[in-house]
Image (cartoon, rainbow, N blue to C red):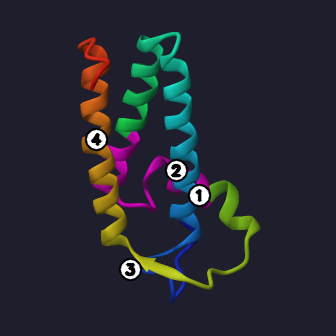
Amino acid sequence: MPVSTPRTSGRQVDVRGPRFAAWITTGVLVLALVVATFSPVAAAVILALQTIVFALGAALGPRRSPYGALFARLVAPRLGAPIETEPVEPLRFAQLVGFVFALVGTVAFFADAIVV
């Protein structure tokens, strides 16, 4: 997220960063669903990449996740100072939950268990 300020340092982040990441994640997952209609292998690769993003977000936290870094470099400098912050821990837990579901989906795609 943006450079640390007293309100965003430590265990708090600008709420706009995780929202930005959620929009990208939504787009990636929609893309995987659309691609799955004509190429399950390509959809599996897309979902596998998103699984890696979830794993990094859970392990490193929102500031150092790929989408968080993208927000910090490209979006945050164009925005004003954060007005609202949120704690990091629930965001890391959400990334962990996303990782588990995406991992199950990725394994199912590669195992040709499309029903899963």
Q: Amino acid at mark 2?
A: Tyr
Q: Position of residue 43 (x, y in %)?
A: 45, 20
Among the two numbered marks 2 and 3 on one chain, the one whose residue lies closer to the N terminus: 3
Read off the residue under disc 2. Answer: 67
Q: Nearer the viewer, mark 2 or mark 4?
A: 4
Q: Amino acid at mark 4?
A: Phe
Q: Amino acid at mark 3?
A: Gly
What residue is drawn where x is 32% and y is 69%?
90
Whole-Å distance between the Cαs marked 2 and 1?
8 Å
Q: Quarter holding the C terminus?
A: top left
Q: Quarter holding the N terminus?
A: bottom right
Position above or below: 98 against 104? below
Stretch in magenta: 53-72
Q: Are marks 2 and 3 in contact (CB under 8 Å)?
A: no
Q: Is residue 20 left or right of residue 108?
A: right
Among the two numbered marks 1 and 3 on one chain, the one whose residue lies closer to the N terminus: 3
Q: Nearer the viewer, mark 4 or mark 1?
A: 4
Whole-Å distance between the Cαs marked 2 and 4?
19 Å
Q: Position of residue 19 (x, y in %)?
A: 55, 62
Read off the residue under disc 1. Answer: 20
Q: Are marks 2 and 1 in contact (CB under 8 Å)?
A: yes
Q: Position of residue 34 (x, y in %)?
A: 55, 24
Q: Secondary structure at mark 2?
A: helix
Q: Secondary structure at mark 3?
A: loop
Whole-Å distance between the Cαs marked 4 and 3?
29 Å
Residue 101's disc is: 4
Q: Nearer the viewer, residue 45 or 38?
A: 38
Q: Is residue 26 left or right of residue 99?
A: right
Identify the residue at the far front of this view.
Answer: 115
